[in-house]
Amino acid sequence: MVLLMVVCANLGDLMLKRGMLQIGAVQISGPGIWHALLATIQNGTIWLGILFLIGFTFCYMTAVSWADYSYVMPAGAFGYAVQTMLAVVILHESVNAQRWVGVVLIVAGVLLVGQTHPSTTETKVLEEPEAVSP
Amino acid sequence: MIRIGLMLVFFICCSTGGEIAMTHGMKQVGEPGSFRVKALLRFAWTAMRNGWVWFAIPLLAASFYSLLILLSWAPLSVVIPASAFNYVVGTFGAKYLLKEQVSVKRWMGVVMVCIGVTLVLLTGQG
């Protein structure tokens, strides 16, 4: 499930990038943003990306319901490195040493941020209304 | 480079603001009493009547759209790692808005993410 989660997240982002490459750079102006909004709604690759991201959310929620967050979270952290690798291999982006060092620091930092107690505040539980006896 | 940085700040603000508002709203709503259909429907109805949830939804929509704009401007290998800055803003939000306890280890992680994102952004458009 964790593997499927990582695959869905990475493919989702890749599809969004592919879709935006097809649409082109968004111009920051009223007509530019409106045109880009219509183009994204009509773009099949963007919708495919959204479907993958919905799949990621489903896998993530299932994974954290089966396993500890501390087990699932590192997969998300390493996703930054996997995504950069996929950008090089599939999208042929050039990534220099400085960017790789930055990505490694981000992965290590996110792993540290994730190593915290999952709950430091109290959560209330919604009580079901008691059945009214006839 | 500057417009990417500014859009990244807008994306992070919308995304973190949306997540914090959603968390705050869902903490007010509480957990569902059980996983029976009636309890889940009651849970969804309570969530839909919460003002914080409605405040979060447009923020999260704006964050998704600003991510698309970022992807149209910059390489995937810049946008996705830089989006990890969410963890930095999220930690400050958790500490000062949601009053959660943040460990020294977590602050160290925040510093590493900051340095990493700066290095990635400095590599620019290439």
Image: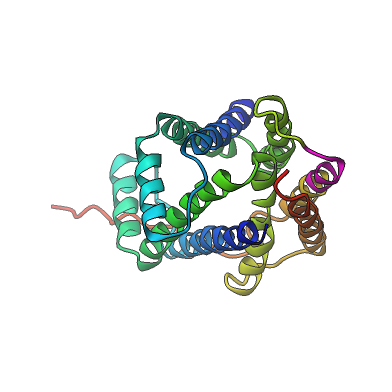
Vertical arrangement, residue A86 with respect to residue B37, above or below: above
| Residue A5 magenta-highlighted | no
Q: How many marks?
A: 0
Residue depicted at x 78% and y 38%: A95
> Could you say where residue B87 lies in the image, as x and y percent from the top left?
67, 57
Instruction: Identify the image's colour scheme: rainbow, by chain, secondary structure or one colour.
Output: rainbow
Residue depicted at x 62% and y 56%: B4
The stretch in magenta equals: A95-103
Outermost residue, left direction?
A134
Vertical arrangement, residue A92 with respect to residue A110, above or below: above
Q: Please name whichever residue, A124 or A63, is drawn nearer the observer in this view of the structure.
A: A63
Residue depicted at x 65% and y 29%: A91
Q: Quadrant of residue A71?
A: top right
> Could you say where residue A76 lies in the image, as x and y percent from the top left?
67, 40
Q: Please name whichever residue, A133 or B27, is drawn nearer the observer in this view of the structure.
A: B27
> Could you say where residue B95 lies in the image, as x and y percent from the top left?
66, 70
Q: Quadrant of residue A7?
A: top right
> Could you say where residue A89 lies in the image, as x and y percent from the top left?
71, 25
Magenta stretch: helix, strand or loop mostly? helix
| Residue A101 magenta-highlighted | yes
* Left or right of residue B58, residue B63 in this image: right
Quadrant placement of the N terminus of chain A: top right
Residue depicted at x 68% and y 32%: A87
Q: Please name whichever residue, A125 or A102, is drawn nearer the observer in this view of the structure.
A: A102
* Left or right of residue B45, residue B73 in this image: right
